[in-house]
Amino acid sequence: MISCALPAAPDADETVGEKPLPLAEWAETLVGAALAGTTIEVTKRYDS
């Protein structure tokens, strides 16, 4: 699980799209990096 913060409000195209969310890819995102295809930055990871 990851925790994220928005540096700015995303565009509607960023939050609503036709493609499925890449959750598995996002789960591997390192702290400080943006989720692929977004401007949402990972602020904390909760690895088990």
Image (tube, helix red, strand yellow):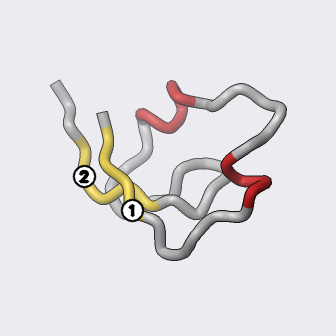
Horizontal relation, residue 14 to residue 32: left or right: right
Image quarter hosting the C terminus: top left
Horizontal relation, residue 28 to residue 25: left or right: left
What type is the residue that disc 1 sits on?
Ala
| Residue under the image location 37 percent in, 50 percent down | 30
| Residue under the image location 30 percent in, 59 percent down | 43
Helix, strand or loop at label 1? It is: strand
Q: Residue 38's spot in the image, x, y percent? A: 63, 56
Quadrant in which residue 10 is drawn: bottom right
What type is the residue that disc 2 sits on?
Lys
Helix, strand or loop at label 2? It is: strand
Vertical placement of residue 35 versus 46, above or below: below
Horizontal relation, residue 22 to residue 14: left or right: left
**Which-is-in-front pick, marks 1 and 2?**
1
| Residue under the image location 20 percent in, 37 percent down | 46
Spot the residue most to the right: 18
State the separation of the CA atoms marked 1 and 2.
Answer: 9 Å
Quadrant in which residue 9 is drawn: bottom right
Q: Earlier in the sequence, mark 1 or mark 2?
A: 1
Q: Residue 24's spot in the image, x, y percent? A: 51, 25
Image quarter hosting the N terminus: top left
Near-viewer residue (21 or 34): 21
Which numbered dot is residue 5?
1
Badge 1: few (under 14), some or many (20 or more) residues near its Cα, within 10 Å? Answer: some
Q: Residue 26's spot in the image, x, y percent? A: 50, 38
Vertical placement of residue 7 versus 2, above or below: below
Count up the numbered dots: 2
Instruction: Give the labeled residue for mark 2.
Output: 44
Near-viewer residue (43 or 12): 12
